[in-house]
Amino acid sequence: MIQSDRTDRAQAGFTLLEVMIALAILSLVAVAFLRAQASSIRLVDESVQISMATLLARERMAELESRGFPQPGDNSGTGGEAFPSFRWEHIISTTELPNIRKAVVRILWTEGDLKRSMELTAYFARR
């Protein structure tokens, strides 16, 4: 009887090797999960930056539209209080048609070490 009690106790728990393998698998899963979380946070931040740049570009283009038929030339500025990390520039140029002008609004910002930009183009006709 004494010998069978010892055998049952020895088989009742996990060995050190089994625990170490389980911890190794768990740590690999945890690292993969943390990488996925970091990547999703980075993508959310990038999408917020692109959305804000789009809003600023639309705001600048709406201002050009409100002026009517714009004169050719360049202008630039910052995003102001609403968009402090952005810069904008707009370029208005003539086209082959005398009553049509091309307007390009470019938004510039930095994301870490990367310099990012986006452009919005519209054509204005003389009324």
Image: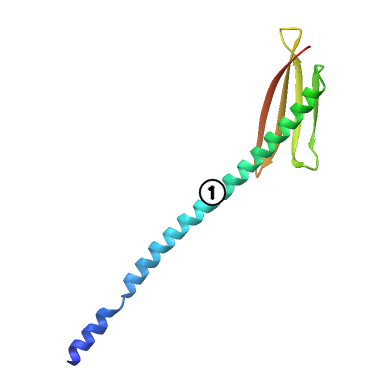
From the top left corner, tell me how far across and down residue 84 is, in percent: 77, 42
From the top left corner, tell me how far across and down residue 104 is, in percent: 71, 23
Q: Which residue is mark 1?
A: 39
Front position in the image: 68 or 117: 68
Q: Which residue is painted at 37% across and 69% down in the image?
A: 20
**Residue 88, located in which quarter of the rendered image?**
top right
Label 1 Cα crowd, 10 Å radius (few <14 / some 14-19 / many 20+): few
Image quadrant in which the N terminus is located: bottom left
Q: Amino acid at mark 1?
A: Ser
> Can you say whether 71 is above or below 82 in the image?
above
State the residue lying farthest toward the top.
97
Q: 45 left or right of 91?
A: left
Front position in the image: 28 or 13: 13
From the top left corner, tell me how far across and down residue 44 is, in percent: 59, 46
> Can you say whether 65 is above or below 10 in the image?
above
**Residue 98, located in which quarter of the rendered image?**
top right
From the top left corner, tell me how far across and down residue 50 is, in percent: 64, 38
- Colour scheme in the image? rainbow
Q: Which residue is painted at 18% across and 87% down in the image?
A: 4
Image quadrant in which the C terminus is located: top right
Q: Which residue is painted at 73% across and 20% down in the image?
A: 103
Q: Which residue is painted at 64% across and 43% down in the image?
A: 48
Front position in the image: 126 or 6: 126
State the residue lying farthest toward the bottom.
2
Q: 6 left or right of 33?
A: left
**Residue 18, located in which quarter of the rendered image?**
bottom left
Q: Secondary structure at mark 1?
A: helix
